[in-house]
Image (cartoon, grey):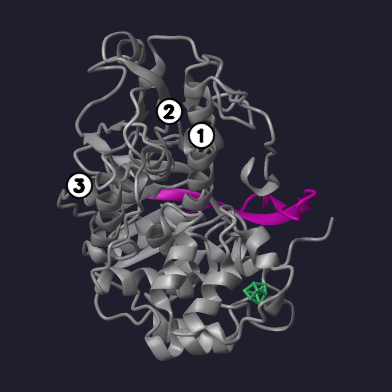
Amino acid sequence: MKPKERLAIPRQKANELDIAYRITNFEEVTAGFDEDTAIREANRCLQCKKPTCREGCPIGNNIPGFIEKLREGKFEEGYWIIRQTSSLPAVCSRVCPHEFQCEGSCVRGKKGEPVAIGMLERFLVDWMVRSNRNMAMPCALPKNKKVAIIGSGPAGMTTAYHLAHEGYPCTIFESLPLFGGMLAVGIPPYRLPRNIINAEFDALKNCGVTVENNITIGKDITIPQLKDEKDFSAVFVSVGAHNSRKLGIEGEDLQGVMHGVDYLRRVCLGEKMNLGSKVVVVGGGNVAIDVARTALRTGSKDVFILYRRTKQEMPAAMAEIHHLEEEGVHVEFLAAPVKIHGANGRLTKIECQRMQLGDCDASGRCRPVVVEGSNFMIEADAIIAAVSQNIDHTADRSLEVATTKWGTYAVDPLTLQTSVPWIFAGGDAVLGPQTAAKAVYQGKVAAESIKRYLEGTDLHAGRMVRECESS
Ligand code: SF4
């Protein structure tokens, strides 16, 4: 199988990104399109009769529809077109890897640059926030069956949003003191400003959704108690994937070794972290990049990333890699850690091996193979492993809910119903670490299933799974 090709950001696009993502300071990096740039970009859209961009969008947003309104200067109308399908446009427009989704499917991209769909969506949302427009949709009259939602991340927020608009009172239980789950403690504010999460939160509260922070389901109250004692008729589990996966190498318990989402959580919760001057981050996804850029912002001078494949295979979004390089973070490609060395209980250096690319799988992703006898050392003050995350099962430990071999919840792919009929699950808790847009899509699916469950109608009738959201 031929290796999968990944194009570099074309020069013109890179120039536009440099303007749009102008670095003003380390607090807020992304500047967004101004009105003229947005309208100019919107005019590049061909208004295709069969818009492939829409097929690439996990939520199925009407992309040509909102772009058409934008180029006519009808910004509020454009926003409401997005809102018909998306519960979290402010978030998705900022953190989705558009190049793998809508922009990756745009016909314009076949012979040049795709339309900058994410930036156009973001322009409309920012315009609404800046203009103080009402972003909440009208809600139905309250019904008498209520729903408990565990976790306030994108899947939980979306399920609450859609059920609340149907009139079902929802309570979101969040173990953290903040709202937003992984959005709030896994994505740094320079990439997703907190006023944006709060704008989405306000739209939820306007519809009667309540949030109870600092409640850990499975510790403070169990899922069966929610049903039997608190009278919730259905439960949606959207606990995210907050447990860091370990490297599994010797020395990982030494002081100075941390894991990606734990580090980001501590920083996002306000803890002052000093990692020292030289920081090595292990991984090639968006979490690794967020960790590296956050380390720069918390005072580290020499930050670099170890990644065992090449830039072509990095799962991180291209724009994020671009900003990483722009900020001076070096990526050591084709290198993998094998052992962490230390003295007096504290790490001193990391031993690595050179890799080369071997056979490629059906998707074109090539397997890294060790180059024998290539070991080398890197001195470090801190090492942060950002190689993936697992699901925390505290919530369901008092009852038996079926899980997969990966530790995610086993659900009916069409309805997201678990092995316990009144419990549904979605987002990273089902997919593993994934994009916000996929979590939003699953939130929508779960809301429809829970509504049918509460109304006693067929959960399956007239529904189908969209390919791009099922894995
Ligand atoms: Fe516009 Fe690209 Fe979508 Fe066509 S595929 S409608 S050009 S955004």
Q: Which residues are magenta?
A: 349-377
Which residue is situated farthest in the right direction here? 1
Q: Classify 393 as above or below 51.
A: above
State yes or no: Cβ of the residue under disc 1 lies below 8 Å from any atom of ligand 1. no
Percent position (x, y) of residue 395? 36, 21
The residue type indicated by label 1 comes to: Ala
Q: Nearer the viewer, mark 1 or mark 3?
A: 1
Mark 1 residue crowding within 10 angstroms, few (<14) / some (14–19) / many (20+): many
| Distance of label 1 from label 3 (alpha carbons) | 29 Å
User: Which residue position holds label 2?
Assistant: 236
Q: Is residue 110 left or right of residue 75?
A: right
Label 3: element kind: loop
The picture places residue 299, in percent across and down from the top left corner, at: 21, 64
Q: Name the residue located 63 percent from the left edge and 50 percent from the top edge.
A: 373
The reply to whether the C-beta atoms of the residues labelled 1 and 2 are less than 8 Å apart is yes
| Figure check: 246 above or below 36 | above
Is 417 magenta? The answer is: no
The residue identified by callout 1 is 446
Q: Is mark 2 within 8 Å of ligand 1?
A: no
**Vertical placement of 77 versus 235: above or below?**
below
Query: Which quadrant is home to the N terminus?
Result: bottom right
Of marks 1 and 2, which one's residue comes earlier in the chain?
Answer: 2
Q: To which residue does mark 3 refer?
A: 269
Task: Report the residue at 47% width, 48% height from top.
Answer: 351
Callout 3 amino acid: Leu
